[in-house]
Image (tube, rainbow, N blue to C red):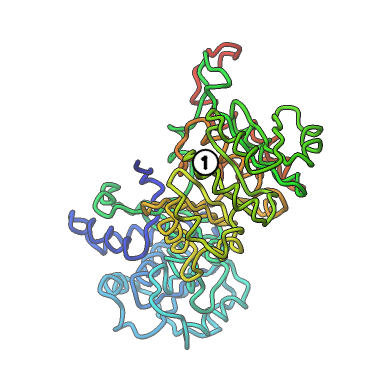
Amino acid sequence: MSLDNNNALLTPSQMVRADAAAIALGITGPTLMEAAGAAVAATVARRWPDGVVVVLCGPGNNGGDGFVAARHLAASGRTVRLALLGDRHSLSPDAAHHAAYWEGDILPMQPSVFEGAAVVIDALFGAGLSRPIKGEAAQVLAQLAQCGVPVCAVDMPSGVHGDTGELWGPSVQADCTVTFFRKKPGHLLMPGRALCGELLVADIGIPADVLNGIEPAAFENGPAHWLADFPRPTANAHKYQRGHVLVVGGAVMTGAARLAAMAAARAGAGLVSIAAPQDAWAVYAASLTTVMVHPFQSLASFQDILDDERKNCIVIGPGAGVSGQTRAQVLQALCTRRPVVLDADGITVFRDDPDELFSQLSSQCVLTPHEGEFGRLFSQGGSKLDRACAAARQSGAVVLLKGPDTVIAHPDGRAIINSNAPSSLATGGTGDVLAGFIGGLIAQGMDSFLAAAAAVWLHGEAAAAFGPGLIASDLPEQLPVVFRDLLSPTLPACLPGSSPRK
């Protein structure tokens, strides 16, 4: 199952390979640099049409882009000050090529260069940062941060690592970042994502088919990856064809399972049931009208509920409680060999013996930990993308590592990074809703990896559509609005009961 290369994320080393592949096809390095610098100049001219432009150039190809941008802006009549970090003789070959066309002064890096600036172009380092920033470069970035001038970053805000989004020294908040050909993981992973401002991807003439030889494994989330597989009821569909989600409820924290169940229903599952402890059955039954509630008193009676094979996806963990019973129920659910979405307490109960859990998982199962839960089962070393991918390989399941930069990783090495989550999702219960969305899509026959990616994207879109004041229970109610925007253009015009589209 391939993902859409238009949304591929390239590591800095993969971007070097893309440049090399383009050069092998006859597109010279200076030509690529000319296109990149011209794109930066056009962005600056559009966003900041007046005033002095200060261009900070580093010694590598990022600095070369800066020389090109400076030349284009000066040619249009703008006042441009260009400052170079280091000696002109240390420039990379392509950067030196374009520096030779710069007719203005080349100033040293000093605080006075920022005086009266309307905008600063940060062309110091870009995505290919190879070591922490120290010395004069660190001082320059600190001065830039203090001067309060708008910043356009070239490729990546200096100080942000292109692979990981981590900060490798002082960094500056960019108002916009212009990158080239494809985004990098560091554009989407925190904290780098927060420093990029508006992110623009410029076409600099690299043919898209060079990606065939690179085979990227990481992608930005979006409907292009999964919309073709998204479940759509046919005109003759009935509820039993749309799947049956079983959510396992806890005895005390009953709201979590109810949120997950309503989310599964809104995601399109034909039927949703909650397996509820006998003592809490009345709480669940009295508060749910579209969800069936099945009581159980023991692991044996819980097994009776599981034995109904029409319940083709199981969600367990939200509000379940950290107990031996939850641990046993998770293992019972996994023994059915049906897809299981495992969240919250269903993950935590295996902190003392993760291997017992891993031995029962498969790629049709989805783990949805936040960082705290993740750390109870998996190693914490490396970037968020690396950690999620390693966890998926180790566990054999799809791992969805939550956060503002949620990563969805498949055991085969593919990964998707989500970028549409608003800060309003940082409230209790939204993770329970996400688990329900995933379960609802899987029950309708969607591949678990794609269902997880689709659910995360829908989760973010629903939150953004609702706006400020969001609480978790608003998310399922907002989902129909998102569905109308997502699916209407692709639905037949004359389904029974529908109005013809104009």
State the residue in front, 230 or 282.
282
Residue 249 picture location, percent across and down: 69, 43
Q: Quadrant of the C terminus?
A: top right
State the residue in front, 8 or 234.
234
Residue 399 picture location, percent across and down: 49, 53
How many residues crowd around disc 1 within 10 Å: few (fewer than 14), some, or many (20 or more)? many
| Residue found 31% across the figure and 61% down from its top | 14
Residue 461 picture location, percent across and down: 61, 42
Q: Which residue is mark 1?
A: 454
Image quadrant in which you'd find residue 193: bottom right
State the residue in front, 174 or 102.
174
| Residue found 67% across the figure and 51% down from its top | 425
Residue type beneath disc 1: Ala
Determine if residue 407 is in view. yes
Image quadrant in which you'd find residue 496: top right
Q: Quadrant of the N terminus?
A: top left
State the residue in front, 288 or 265.
288
- Judge whether 502 appears above or below 4 on screen: above
In the picture, measured across the screen, residue 401 lies left or right of residue 467, that is left
As helix, strand or loop, the secondary structure at mark 1 comes to helix
Instruction: Report the label total.
Output: 1
Determine if residue 41 is in view. no
- Judge whether 241 appears above or below 61 on screen: above
Residue 333 picture location, percent across and down: 55, 43
In the picture, measured across the screen, residue 70 lies left or right of residue 495, that is left
